Image (cartoon, rainbow, N blue to C red):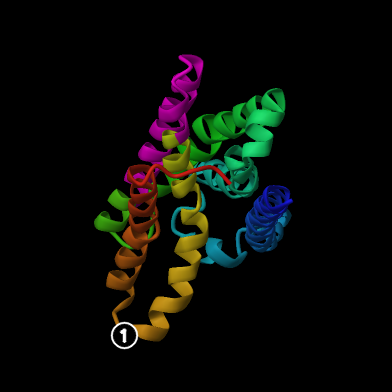
Amino acid sequence: MCIIERMKAAASWEWLRILIAVATTSFFSYLMLHIVLPYLAFRIDTDFLLAKQSIIHIRHWRYAFYIHVFTSTFVLFLGIFQFIDRLVYGYPRLHRAIGLIYVSIVVLLSGPSGLIMGYYGNGGLYAQISFMTLALLWIGFTATAYLLALRRDIESHQNFMLRSYALTLSAITLRSYAFIIPRLIHMNGGDEYVLIAWLSWIPNLLIAEFLIRKKWRSI
């Protein structure tokens, strides 16, 4: 009876972890969607675009911007499902389908558009280097994860997916730091933007590497 109770408790805890992870990701995806929706009007005087009036006329930048903001929310939401054991092992076809959608969006749409945006990023050269490095690593880690899956190197595939999703989460951490840092540190606008640009993804990647070294487990 004791063993059965332990199994039930473990199963309950597993479902609770899944619920917390999905609920948290859904919440932040909703916040991102709330930020993105105003851009559906395709007005050049909307929020972030007000700071880009000097380059709004550059067609490829404008296309990259809309592609990036409209697709990033989807990969943010889809990514968490790649780490749920019950989905990975219980429904492998669904896992592969969601994974293929995630990889395709990042490698073909979100990543390249982010690279273009990074080239024209605010904050000067150092911020631009940060955003472009982020985009290249995001594409590289995601493509590598896909190739490793094809080779059936599952452990390495999972590790690179974790790195990829850690960079996907930079969409959240960037906005979090943009809200918190000005309230904690007094810096000029340029230095503050550079700091946020690097903080948005480096700590995420360090946490991912720590989890990999500790032989992390899926949700």
- Residue 128, position as x, y percentages in the image: 32, 52
In the rendered structure, which segment of residues is drawn in magenta? 131-158
Decide: is 125 above or below 50.
Answer: above
What secondary structure is the magenta-colored segment mainly? Answer: helix
Image quarter of residue 32 = bottom right
Q: Give the image quarter of residue 212.
A: top left
Q: Secondary structure at mark 1?
A: loop
Give how far across and how far down residue 66 sits, in percent. Answer: 60, 47
Picture residue at 66% right of the left edge, 63% below the top: 31
Q: Can residue 82 be spotted in the picture?
A: yes
Q: Which residue is mark 1?
A: 186
- Give the residue furthest to the front: 1
Residue 193: name its quadrant.
bottom left
Residue 211 percent location from the top left of the image: 39, 48
Q: Amino acid at mark 1?
A: His
The outermost residue toward the top is: 151
Residue 119 in view in this figure: no
Instruction: Examine the structure image and report whether residue 155 is included in the region drawn in magenta.
Output: yes
Q: Is residue 138 magenta?
A: yes
Judging depth in this view, the residue of 57 and 112 nearest the camera is 112
User: Considering depth in this image, is 171 or 122 the residue closer to the camera?
Assistant: 171
Q: Is residue 213 above or below residue 189?
A: above
Residue at (66%, 56%) from the top-left corner?
Answer: 13
Q: Residues within 10 Å of mark 1 (few under 14, many from 20)?
A: few
* Total numbered labels placed on residues in the image: 1
Q: Is residue 146 left or right of residue 203?
A: right
Residue 23 spot, x, y in % from top left: 69, 58
Q: Nearer the viewer, residue 28 or 48?
A: 28
Camera-side residue of 141 and 150: 150
